[in-house]
Image (cartoon, rainbow, N blue to C red):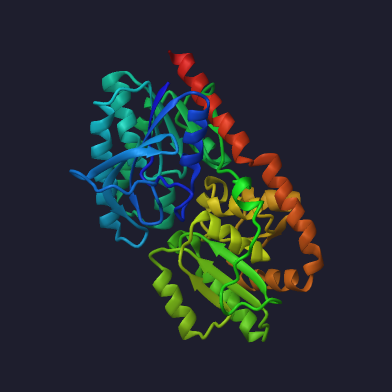
């Protein structure tokens, strides 16, 4: 099959963001399919292309993937209007490609919801097979977060959501809640695949050297958060927990926040004003460097704002990187990941919006370092049993093949 794959935020492992689409595309190619990846220029990513843009576009072969990159800058620090324009421009350019290129299957993955537009046009104007992958439920998520309040915009997004689900021949959700959300719009016998983000064991589980940033001592207990510093992540909670630690005069617990995002300068200013010497901010790094840092860390922080839509409706990359590295995880909201952490005994799930409990979890694990090896082993067991990227990518390819042949 020739697959036209749309992912605005596509990145290779040389970037500092998720590589799901890269790994899935490589597995499709290994199984004998051709993949053309269409993407934009994401500030945290690295598409693998370095040639000059011509008429706002460049292309080339990246590890067997034919990549078409639009010169459309996007970052989490942009304003809502800037991001909306970037999404709209990407959708417009993608629709043009979907109506002109030759292919068998069009595959589109969110976010945002407008990523579905080239698939919708290809389905109805060219009768192409369309598979839609949903990483976040729109408009439910931005509505609950308060990012979008305009009822007209929310209404239009609801219509687009309905049309996208009805147009697609196949659907993939990245979490149980997303699958349930998709199912509400489809017949009861619809086959929706639940394929979460995966663990890149080859990157995170076989690291030789570790990287220890300055201001970290060899005997420090290190908690690490890797990911976007945005409204959804609720990082003010970990700063509040850091303040609790400092007030208790506990100086050997250090918290590393590595990543980028709109709220990073605000969080840095807050940490400075409160003289939180136990919090260290780092810039994003590629996967190899991140794996070295995780080798030094003692625990990973899975943090999100207390929004019910997050409980079962997200599949955060950072969690899967943590367990792939054998890191115990502290989680600060209920839901399917908290249930897995408790079931596999690979960390601690604390109540939402309870910063004292978050601080106490760090204190308890610091005092019980002899228990960390068992938690680490359990984290790796969870990674291998349920979230091995190689197994999930095989499931991904099988679903696409079966969906295509059923409607061929």
The residue drawn where x is 46% and y is 19% is: 404
Q: Is residue 125 above or below residue 149?
A: above
| Side of 117 where 311 appears, left or right | right
- The x and y percentages for residue 269 are 42, 79
In which quadrant of the rendered image does the C terminus lie? top left
Q: Is residue 229 above or below residue 48?
A: below
| Side of 153 where 35 appears, left or right | right
Q: How many marks?
A: 0
In which quadrant of the rendered image does the N terminus lie? top left
| Between 255 and 289, the one nearer to me in the picture | 289
Name which quarter of the figure residue 146 lies in: bottom left
- The x and y percentages for residue 145 are 43, 56
Q: Is residue 271 above or below residue 405?
A: below
| Side of 123 where 402 appears, left or right | right
- The x and y percentages for residue 329 are 66, 59
What is the residue that sits farthest to the top in this orientation? 408
The residue drawn where x is 52% and y is 51% is: 310
What is the residue that sits farthest to the left in this orientation? 55
The residue drawn where x is 18% and y is 43% is: 55
| Between 182 and 206, the one nearer to me in the picture | 206
Name which quarter of the figure residue 245 lies in: bottom right
Q: Is residue 345 visible?
A: no
The residue drawn where x is 67% and y is 58% is: 327
| Side of 228 where 43 appears, left or right | left
Q: Is residue 391 visible?
A: yes
- The x and y percentages for residue 123 are 33, 23
What is the residue that sits farthest to the right in this orientation? 370
């Amino acid at each position: 099959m020739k697959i036209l794959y749309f992912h605005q935020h596509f990145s290779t492992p040389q970037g500092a963001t998720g590589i799901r689409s890269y790994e899935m595309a490589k597995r499709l190619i290994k199984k004998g399919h051709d993949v053309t990846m269409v993407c934009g220029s994401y500030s945290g990513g690295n598409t693998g292309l370095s040639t000059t843009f011509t008429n706002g576009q460049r292309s080339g072969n990246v590890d067997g993937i034919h990549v078409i990159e639009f010169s459309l800058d996007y970052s989490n620090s942009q304003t809502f209007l800037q991001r909306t324009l970037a999404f709209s421009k990407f959708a417009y350019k993608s629709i043009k490609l979907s109506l002109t290129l030759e292919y068998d299957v069009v595959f589109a993955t969110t976010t945002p919801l407008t990523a579905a537009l080239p698939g919708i046009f290809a389905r109805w104007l060219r009768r192409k097979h369309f598979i839609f992958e949903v990483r976040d439920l729109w408009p439910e998520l931005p509505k609950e977060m308060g990012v979008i309040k305009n009822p007209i915009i929310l209404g239009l997004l609801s219509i687009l959501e309905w049309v996208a689900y009805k147009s697609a021949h196949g659907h993939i959700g990245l979490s149980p809640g997303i699958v349930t959300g998709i199912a509400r719009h489809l017949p009861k016998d619809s086959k929706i695949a639940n394929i979460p983000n995966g663990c890149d064991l080859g990157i995170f589980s076989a690291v030789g050297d570790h990287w220890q940033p300055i201001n970290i001592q060899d005997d420090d207990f290190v908690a690490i958060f890797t990911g976007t510093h945005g409204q959804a992540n609720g990082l003010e909670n970990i700063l509040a927990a850091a303040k609790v630690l400092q007030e208790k005069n506990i100086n050997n617990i250090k918290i590393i926040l590595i990543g980028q995002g709109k709220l990073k300068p605000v969080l840095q200013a807050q940490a400075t004003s409160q003289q939180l010497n136990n919090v260290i901010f780092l810039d994003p790094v590629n996967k190899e460097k991140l794996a070295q840092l995780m080798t030094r860390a003692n625990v990973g922080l899975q943090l999100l704002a207390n929004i019910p839509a997050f409980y079962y409706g997200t599949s955060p990359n950072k969690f899967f990187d943590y367990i792939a590295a054998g890191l115990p995880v502290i989680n600060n909201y209920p839901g399917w990941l908290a249930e897995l952490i408790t079931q596999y005994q690979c960390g601690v799930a604390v109540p939402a919006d309870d910063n004292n409990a978050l601080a106490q979890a760090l204190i308890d694990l610091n005092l019980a370092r002899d228990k960390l090896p068992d938690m680490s082993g359990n984290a790796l067991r969870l990674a291998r049993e349920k979230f091995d990227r190689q197994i999930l990518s095989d499931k991904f390819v099988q679903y696409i093949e079966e969906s295509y042949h059923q409607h061929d």
